Amino acid sequence: MDKKTFRTLLKLYLCTWGVFFLFYYIGIWRANISFEQSIETLGTFVPSKGFLFLFHIFFLLVYVLFISIRYAVRGFKKKGWSLALKRFSFSLVIPIFVIYISIKGMISLNSAEFFNYTWDYSIENTSQKATNLYAIDGKHRGMSVFWSYDKEDVQKATKDIIKDNIEWVTVIPFIDQQDETTNRIGGTVTPGVWSRRDSVTMKHISRLQERDIRVHLKPHIWLRDGWRSNIELSQEDWEIWFKSYEERMLQYARIATKMEVPLFCIGTELRTAIQHQPEAWLPFIKEIKKIYSGKLTYASNWDDPIEDIPFWKELDYIGVQAYFPLTTQEEPDLETIKAGWDAHITALKNASEQYEMPILFTEIGYRSDATATIAPWEWGALTGALTQKKSDKTQQLAYEAMFQKLWDEPWFAGCYIWQWHTRTTAKGASTNVDFTPRFKPAENTITKWYGAVGEVTVNSNK
């Protein structure tokens, strides 16, 4: 590459970043988000591999566009508009059209599904307040909700939550950490002094409580690179890490107390943090209880042996991220999915009896694709409906099977569905193959079961 080409490429690269920041801050301004919070958000997602990959794909497209336009301009200088338009068409317009048609065709093909589901509107809650069946059977009718900054989206989504007989919502503030070898969680905490992020969390909680929706406060560590279950540190660094984790979680316990949140999760999928620091958790929980008097749980991953968690007796629920594999085949029928629960139910029931404590699914979710019950924990590919076979039927049957097998078990305390986005639209749901059940048949199935009184949960300490 000669120097002139390199300089051109560098200028275009910097301009692409400039355009990104321009549109980002226009969006921030329209959403009425503070400059400080916008900087904090940038620091979270810009360094991530996913964002950088997508940005550079976008830059390559910009560069191709630039090359095509330059090629057309040179043709114009030689022979006028005739050659310019011909060059531009053959180098860019026709290829883009072919790619666009191919993508639309693939999405249409993958989204085509002959599944006739009759929506039952009679089971929906038409009041403006959440139901209170929890007071009868002690079961959590929960949903993990992710909020947009659009007020209309939030208001519509909150009404839909109530409509679907959802009584509990998981509010999930994210705690930033660089990667699996970082010995300290990002940010600083001043006890009782709320950051902007804390204020946003409390605003979400308040909005839900106005509609009588109960809140499960469940902070998540979010690694920019890696997974929180696989954090690996030296013993000295583990002590530093745990101190920073404790500081942050005690602050969330203060928020839970201030906002009168009835359920607080002390950790999510922290396998190695428990393995390497088992003695640190009991004192930590005691500090939590000095601040917060509500119910406590911990969200263990589905493949973490429950007996490996040393502090269940200090909590109120055995929390499980319930992404259990249920089948080995695509698009299974209902009976096959139900049979896949048998071994897991035996283990869960035994654990409940051993610890004399109910089991709470702190998360459970299924994608709306043909392989959803094979490896439910897997996120969908970035290409989504372009490469995955959509199957609303598989998602709907997966929830139906789960409720049929578990809802009337006295040791089962309910579940939190993963996940609900306030910006989801009915049109988008027609090709969406991700976890959200909103505007899909699974939503109506959840509504049906959440509207039914289950077997009273034992040892729920209501």
Image: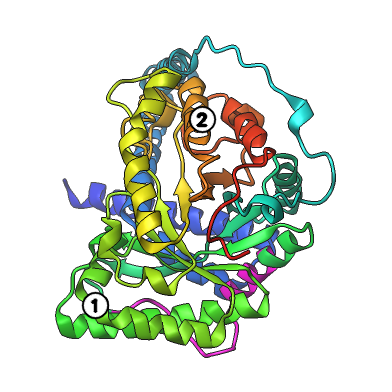
- As shown in the figure, which amino acid type bears the numbered disc 2? Asn
**How far from the left and from the top, in percent, is residue 354?**
35, 59
Foreground residue, 194 or 52? 194
**How far from the left and from the top, in percent, is residue 99?**
40, 20
Q: Is residue 132 left or right of residue 94?
A: right
Q: Is residue 118 visible?
A: yes
For residue 248, the mark is: none
Q: Is residue 166 above or below residue 338?
A: below
Queried whether the magenta region covers residue 191, the answer comes back as yes
For the image shown, how many numbered marks are present on the structure? Answer: 2
Q: Is residue 341 left or right of residue 114?
A: left
For residue 277, the mark is: 1
Bounds of the magenta segment? 184-204
For residue 432, the mark is: 2
Q: Please report the residue visible at 60 percent of the width from the left and 82 percent of the height from the top.
A: 194
Queried whether the magenta region covers residue 166, the answer comes back as no
| Nearest to viewer (mark 1 / mark 2) | 1
Foreground residue, 374 or 338? 338
Foreground residue, 155 or 43? 155
| Marks 1 and 2, the one that precedes in the sequence | 1
**How far from the left and from the top, in percent, is residue 439?**
63, 31
Q: Is residue 199 left or right of residue 70?
A: right
Q: Is residue 343 above or below residue 322?
A: above
Q: Is residue 223 left or right of residue 333?
A: left
- As shown in the figure, which amino acid type bears the numbered disc 1? Gln
For the N terminus, the quadrant is top left
Foreground residue, 366 or 97? 366
**How far from the left and from the top, in percent, is residue 237?**
21, 82
Q: Is residue 86 above or below residue 316?
A: above
